[in-house]
Image (spheres, grey):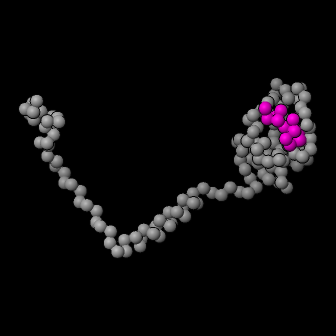
Amino acid sequence: IVELATRYGIATPYTSFLVEEETAVTPPLPAMGPGYGTKAVPMAQSAQRLAAADAPQEAGGVKEVAGRVFLLVDGVWQESTYQEGTQTLDIQYLSDAYFQLLSELPELGPILALGEEVIFRLRKRFVHVGSTGLIQLSPELIAELKGE
């Protein structure tokens, strides 16, 4: 085996000791001396500042939820397409109607999680979830809201 391996240049467990490396071993790194970290400390501090600032801060009154933009206007999260005075379907926050809406349309969860007062578009109308409004949804209204 050794004879065949050496003749054809095949390294085996029996011939690996014969292999001579043509590249030199890399020299060891220099030892740390006094003052070695004087340049590294400011660089590390700068890197920490950059890491903390890697994402722009979100504007306080603007949020993007479920592909829609919401604006905080007088304590109410309004979808950006909503115009003041537009007729809305009012649903009372945490009422049976609220939970019916959430169970029938679970994709509204992130929108409803914005807060106690939210105005958003649902199909052809705007829905206003707040302190007053419907406490029960009829089957017909649920079907309409689902687009059926």
Q: Is residue 140 above or below residue 59?
A: above
Residue 29 as seen in the image, left or right of residue 102 = left
The answer to whether one can see residue 9 in this image is no
Quadrant where the N terminus is found in the figure: top left
Residue sitting at x 92%, y 37%: 134
Residue 110: give x, y in percent of width and height. 73, 41
- Which quadrant of the figure has residue 103? top right
The one nearer the camera, 83 or 93, is: 93
Residue 97: in magenta span: yes
The one nearer the camera, 39 or 145, is: 39
Q: Is residue 30 above or below residue 73?
A: below
Residue sitting at x 42%, y 68%: 40
- Which quadrant of the figure has residue 112? top right
Residue 38 as seen in the image, left or right of residue 17 = right
Residue 105: give x, y in percent of width and height. 77, 32
The one nearer the camera, 131 or 59, is: 131
Residue 138: give x, y in percent of width and height. 90, 28
Residue 44: give x, y in percent of width and height. 47, 65
Q: Is residue 6 above or below residue 21?
A: above
- Residue that lies at the very extreme toward the bottom in this rendered image: 34
Residue 42: in magenta span: no
Residue sitting at x 83%, y 44%: 119
The one nearer the camera, 96 or 146, is: 96
Q: Which residues are magenta?
A: 88-103
Residue sitting at x 17%, y 35%: 12
